[in-house]
Every structure is written in structure tokens, then in C-alpha cells.
Amino acid sequence: MKLQLTIDHGKDFEVLDMVEKLSPVVDVVEIGYPIMVTFGLTLVQEIRHRNPDVRLYADIKLFHGGTGVIGRCFDMGADVVSVLSAAPDPVISKAVAQAHERGGKIACNLTCPPSRVGERTAQVDELGVDYVIAVSGYIPAYDYDLESHRGPRLFEPKVRPLDIAATAKRNLRQAKLGVSTGINESNIRDVVALGPELVLVGRGILDAPDRTEAAARLKRYMPFEG
């Protein structure tokens, strides 16, 4: 089980500083989608140059075409690159092929209604993705996005925390589970009990007064890998 630090916001020099200080206490560093949009792959390249041993996850959320983009991500230093489960199957298959040719991995973010989580998880697993990333359900807005297209004012939670992740876990055969969104020390025990390979934490670390200590505390809940 690995702790993945998700960095979604910050100036480029702030991101570089966060990676330098926190990479020794986390297992994976994710350069989140907002950062990717702002700074692009040059930041990934710079992080790799400064931190040759860091496990680096580029959250580009590939959806349409873009297999050349996948290759570019790995060429610039990423170890893991994300695609969306809503992408057409041929796009996901080509992304997997591009990744594996370069010794990298593909993470597939679940982007489907709860009623289709099990089915789509099994499908992308069959396509060869390495990880399936499910939202935790601890932030209701994400349940709303997955549940329906109704406006926020009409939202009524229908999915309990970790329901989506647990459903995904039951339908995996080869890929490993990742759980993201709203994870912190108040709920980490329940997340760990589900047995994911990746536990993605952003604000649970980055909003803490002492980020290094927060990351170290979260790590203590995870099974030790000797």
C-alpha cells in the first residue's frame, strides 16, 4: 500500500519545493490536473531532473486520442499517467500499450454513474490498465458528479463513503485499486481497511501546519512493506 501525495495547486516553484520536502515521506507524487494545465510537462521534466528517484504520477486525464501525449509524458519523466474511464476503449488500449512499451503504468480514473462502476471497472481492467482510481465519497460534490446530472441545489447524497471504491475493488482482477478525495486522518482507517494499492491524499497533507508530520502520521496507518 502506497501513500500518494496529490498536488493540485501552487506556483511552479512552490510545487518544486513541496516535492523536494515531501517526497522522502510519501511513496508517489502526483502532479494534479490543474497543475498540468497551468505548467504542462515542462514541470514534470524539471521535477524528474531534480528528483531522479521520485515516483511521479502525471494526472493528465486523457480522454480523446492523444496516445502521442501519453508517450510524451513518459519521455518527460512520468512513471504513471492517468486516463479517464469515459475514454473510448481503443484510446485506453493504446495508452496502455504506450505506457508498457516505456516501462510505465496507466491509472484509470472512474468517471461513470455508480450503477456502472462495477461494469466499467471490469472493462478497463480487461483493457490492461494498472490502477483504477475511485473517489472515496467523503466529499458529497463528487457523489453528485457521479450520481446524476441534476443541479447542485437538488443534490441528495445516495452513495455512502467508500461504496464506489468497494464496488470497484470487487470487480478488479489484475489492476490495483486507488482511492482519492477527502482522505485524512479522520477516515484513513476505513480507507486502509479496503486494501487499496494507492491512497491519494492532497489537502489532508498540504493543509496541515506540518506537512511532513501529517504525511508521516498517515503512513503509520498503512501496512508496512519490508
Image: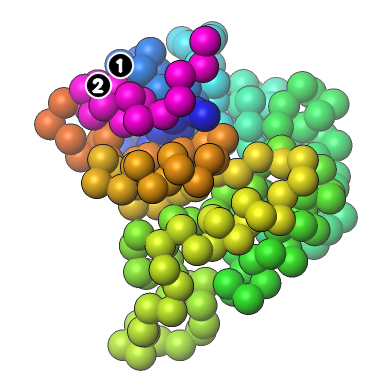
Q: What is the quadrant of residue 123 in the picture?
A: bottom right
Which residues are drawn in magenta? 211-226
Residue 182: horizontal and vertical position, in percent? Answer: 34, 52
Q: Is 41 situated left or right of 17 in this image? A: right
Does any portion of residue 11 appear in the rendered image?
Answer: yes
Q: Is residue 16 something one can see in this rendering?
A: no
- Mark 1 or mark 2, which is nearer to you? 2
Residue 126 percent across, percent down from the top left: 84, 50
Q: Residue at x 46, y 58 (%)?
A: 162
Label of residue 177 in the image? none
Whether residue 205 is in magenta: the answer is: no
The answer to which of 226 and 183 lies nearer the viewer is 226
Look at 38% across and 78% down and name the residue there: 157
Q: Dot 1: within a 10 Å radius of its alpha carbon, few (fewer than 14), some, or many (20 or more) residues?
A: few
- Whether the residues at callouts 1 and 2 have beta carbons within 8 Å, the answer is yes
Residue 125 versus residue 68 in the image, above or below? below
The quadrant in which residue 144 appears is bottom left
The extreme left residue here reads 209
Which colour scheme appears in the figure? rainbow
Residue 60 on image: x %, y % = 58, 45
Question: In the visual, does 56 lie left or right of 80?
Answer: left
Residue furthest toward the front? 193
Q: Residue at x 61, y 26 (%)?
A: 78
* Residue 131 image point, x, y percent: 66, 41
31 vs 65, left or right, is left
Could you tell me which secondary element the residue under label 2 belongs to? helix
Which residue carries the number 1 mark?
21
Q: Amino acid at mark 2?
A: Thr
Gap between marks 1 and 2, in whole Å?
A: 8 Å
The foreground one among 179 and 7 is 179
- Type of amino acid at the residue the image marks with label 1: Lys
